[in-house]
Amino acid sequence: MEPEEGRERLRLHLVTWNVGTASPPPEVTSLLQLNWQGQAMDIYIIGLQEVNSRIVNFLSDLAFDDPWSIFFMTVLSPLGYIKVSSIRMQGLLLLIFAKQAHLPFLRDIQSQFTRTGLYGYWGNKGGIAVRMSVYGHTICFLNCHLPAHMENAEQRLDDFERILEMQQFEGEKISNALDHDILFWFGDLNFRIEDYGLHFIRESINNSRFSLLWEKDQLNMAKKKEPFLQEFMEGPLKFKPTYKFDLYSNDYDTSGKKRKPAWTDRILWRVKPLLHPASEAGETPKEQAVCVSQHSYISHMTYGISDHKPVTGTFELEMEPLVSAPLVLLHPVGHWSAEQDATVSYSTAPEFPSSAWDWIGLYEVTFRHANDYVMYAWVQDNEISSEEDAKQVYLSAEELPAAGGEFLLGYYSSTMQSIVGISLPFEVRPSRTLAEKDLTWDGVSETEKLCDDKPPCDF
């Protein structure tokens, strides 16, 4: 079914996984649905909990990308996905990847975190969020790790309310997580199954009679009595409870504690209610800015590196784009060679908030994130021409890749914390010195080989 005229569809794939301090698995093909034959995902949102946060690991991750970020970039960047944003709070990690073509339309990217462990002083529990404008519509992604244990259901609700209150963003209209057009809430929420005994729960699971357990799921129970939860939607829990498993198996906890299985790992969403849903007589009912439909909500039983199974949700967003043109248009001037200074021409939309800290980066075609440039130039410092309809910036030949190859240009806005313009791919010719070296074999050039045992050649 095609979207209505003037409306677009984006496919989002959300992952939540308590990885139990483990290292990344050998592959994530099924987790990310990379072998799916249908339309490719537009955006991946990956929320992890209990990422290894020992002091040595955490300090090194502050200076360098953590192993999980590197792992997902290695998987997704060859497929044309760019890491748009990431935020880490101790064991919590949130990564967002998008298809390269969407980059100029993902704007106003901000991140926030809220600690709730040890009365708000420790980040082992809490929430981390990334918000952004997607084709003009505001979306917030909130990854949470709430308190554990059966008896802490009220504490989980209190902590979630605290996280919602504390997540404040810049901007008067969307300062709070609940102000966004869409809020996705996911993570190890740690809600358990009350009242029923271990034997009844396991028998219900073994017979795939999950519906018998839904009414005693603490989150489902809370949604019936807590007004602030009633606007959140969730797909049916038609998969096995995702906690607690023996490592590298599909057997529930066989230790002495024999913890009861539970749907601790969840994905919910909330669409901002219309301010005036009731229309006057004869008026056409107002339409939601963004329509959300969930296509799948499943667990992945083949992954056994932790005592939780990962959960994924695939969503389709249908929207009318409020922005359809990049804020910055840029392209290389003339043919580029690694031996000569190069020039970039760019133009900006009237509403673009330019800054002295904006820069233009030269990227390989399959770059991983905004800082994964081959070289860059400050826009204002390197400006050589400024006309009403276009400006030009030079890039020094000393920093151009001597080997040449296929590249593209990206304009990074420090104000919007994102790439707001991207060029088509183009060729950079290698330097002649390097090209001559490439023609050399065993220290003898191809020209010399042609002249062996022959009269002097005149090339």
Image (cartoon, helix red, strand yellow):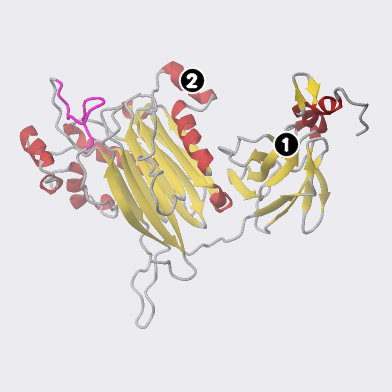
29 within the magenta span:
no
Residue at image position (84%, 25%) is 448
Is disc 2 placed on a helix, strand or loop?
helix
> Residue 213, percent across and down?
12, 44
Q: Quadrant of the N terminus?
A: bottom left
Name the outermost residue toward the bottom: 282
Q: Is residue 22 positioned above or below 299 on the image? A: above
Residue at numbered disc 2: 59
Classify mark 1: residues with Cα within 10 Å, few (<14), some (14-19) or many (20+).
some
- At label 1, the amino acid type is Gly
Label 1 belongs to which residue?
404
Left or right: where does residue 429 sit relative to residue 237? right
Q: Is residue 322 above or below residue 377?
A: below
Position in image of residue 106 (x %, y %)? 53, 50
Foreground label between 1 and 2? 1
Task: Provide residue 257's location: percent of width, then percent of height.
Answer: 14, 22
- Region rendered in magenta: 242-255
* Residue 447 picture quarter: top right
Q: Nearer the viewer, residue 249 or 128?
A: 249
141 sits to left or right of 106? left
Q: Give yes or no for residue 249 being in the magenta stretch.
A: yes
Q: Which residue of the protein is positioned furthest toward the top in this rendering?
A: 56
Q: Is residue 288 visible?
A: yes
Q: Is residue 180 visible?
A: no
Q: Nearer the viewer, residue 236 or 25?
A: 25
